[in-house]
Image (cartoon, rainbow, N blue to C red):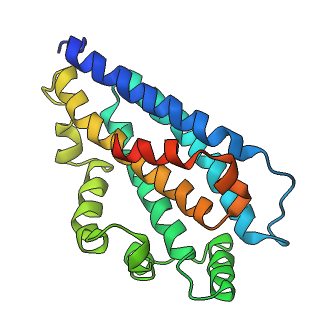
């Protein structure tokens, strides 16, 4: 199949790359924190670990964009979606003690089902209908991440432009969820992200 993108899609790709690069630049000042231990400050330790992962995922997202790798984009999206769900579940604890307890379970791999994480999130922290749309959304992204006819058909007989058309919304969703995670950390004043990260620029990535 033709491997070249149309001029229109090249322009879209350049715009997406700019969003990815800008996200990395926005969160970079957030790394200016000192030594944090899991024992003394589990909330900040968790936030620091997630911040590091988001920076790494952002680099992977840029690589996926330039290789037009629609398959790996689905893996990245499912990962960030699950990370988003767990972050918002943890900080939906009704008290500081419950939040620390949820963190303790996370650190010790006491995992829940994804629906249990969803049920434990405060509704006011997430978009309307987020929980209602979860089941079908998660089912779809999981199908694409396994060897079945849906995942095979992602590439079969598809031009680069057709694959890119599927890639674009996936990358936008990856960025949207990444921004939301940084925003909740900033709202909670973890790692000083409320001061070190430009909140206006951060939120503009969700709306652009």
Residue 116 % position (x, y)? 42, 81
Residue 147's spot in the image, x, y percent? 28, 47
Query: Residue 106's image quarter?
Result: bottom right
Quadrant location of the N terminus?
A: top left
Q: Where is residue 82 shown, x and y percent of the image? A: 45, 61
Residue situated furthest left in the rendering: 157
Q: Quadrant where the C terminus lies?
A: top left
44 relative position to 1: left or right = right
68 vs 31: above or below: above
List the single residue furthest toward the front.
200
Residue at 52% in and 29% down: 21
Q: Is residue 139 left or right of residue 176?
A: left
Most foreground residue, 182 or 55: 182
Tell me if residue 63 can be seen. Answer: yes
The vertical placement of 178 against 106, above or below, is above
- Is residue 118 visible in this depiction of the protein? no
Q: Quadrant of residue 167?
A: top left
């Amino acid at each position: 199949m033709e491997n070249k993108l149309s001029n229109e899609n090249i322009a879209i790709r350049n715009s997406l790359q700019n969003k990815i690069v800008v996200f990395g630049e926005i969160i970079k000042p957030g790394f200016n924190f000192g030594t944090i231990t899991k024992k003394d400050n589990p909330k900040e330790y968790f936030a620091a670990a997630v911040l590091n992962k988001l920076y790494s995922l952002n680099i992977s997202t840029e690589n996926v964009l330039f290789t037009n790798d629609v398959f790996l984009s689905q893996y990245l999206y499912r990962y960030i979606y699950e990370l988003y769900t767990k972050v918002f579940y943890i900080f939906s604890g009704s008290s500081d003690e419950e939040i620390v307890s949820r963190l303790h379970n996370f650190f010790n791999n006491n995992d829940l089902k994804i629906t249990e994480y969803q049920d434990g999130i405060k509704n006011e922290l997430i978009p309307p209908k987020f929980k209602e749309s979860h089941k079908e959304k998660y089912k779809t992204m999981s199908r694409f991440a396994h060897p079945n006819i849906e995942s095979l058909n992602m590439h079969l007989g598809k031009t680069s432009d057709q694959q890119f058309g599927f890639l674009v919304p996936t990358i936008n969703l990856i960025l949207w969820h990444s921004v939301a995670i940084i925003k909740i950390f900033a709202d909670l004043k973890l790692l000083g992200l409320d001061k070190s990260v430009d909140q206006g620029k951060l939120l503009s990535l969700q709306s652009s």
